[in-house]
Image: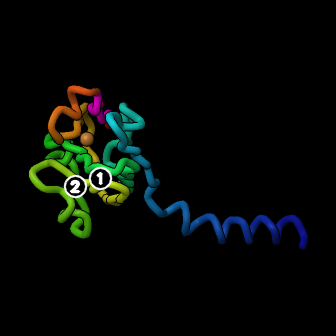
Amino acid sequence: MRPLSALLVIVAIASPLAAQPATRVVEMSNFKFAPAQLELRANTPVVLQLRNDSSGGHSLTAPEFFAASRVDPGSARYVQAGRVEVPGHQAVTLSLTPAAGQYPLKCSHTLHSVFGMKGIIVVR
Ligand SMILES: [Cu+2]
């Protein structure tokens, strides 16, 4: 294949992928979020994959963040009163568009945030 042809093939393959929102993974375990500081781009659609590798349940609770974000209709059912529950050994995938700001996040389960399960979402 000539170099120009190869380049055109690469562009054709890459373009549809570039239009997809980036996926950011948040790992939930006993008792932390990883990353504890989640950095997102303002007004840019993103897919958040919340993975709980523990046997017990956790939540990502960030009412101000979810109130300020535009949560896609298909993901809205996962957000209840600013909280997303993720049962043990499961994952929840959310599509949303965040707004600029700094938002505290924590796990709402008893004592989990006291044990360190908290963090911040920074949207620039
Ligand atoms: Cu928890």
Whichever of labels 2 and 1 marks the residue nearer the N terminus, that label is 2
Q: Examine the rendered structure and indicate whether residue 23 appears above or below residue 35.
A: below
- The residue sitting at 19% across, 43% down in the picture is 61
For image coordinates 63% across by 64% down, the residue present is 14
Q: Position of residue 77 (x, y in %)?
A: 18, 65
Q: Quarter holding the C terminus? A: top left
Residue type at mark 2: give it: Arg
Label 2 to label 1: alpha-carbon separation: 5 Å
Q: Secondary structure at mark 1?
A: strand
Observer-nearest of 29 and 99: 29
Q: Which residue is mark 1?
A: 97
Q: Secondary structure at mark 2?
A: strand
Horizontally, residue 14 falls left or right of residue 80, namely right
Residue 70, disc: 2
Q: Is-magenta flag for residue 36?
A: no
Vertical placement of residue 15 versus 122, above or below: below
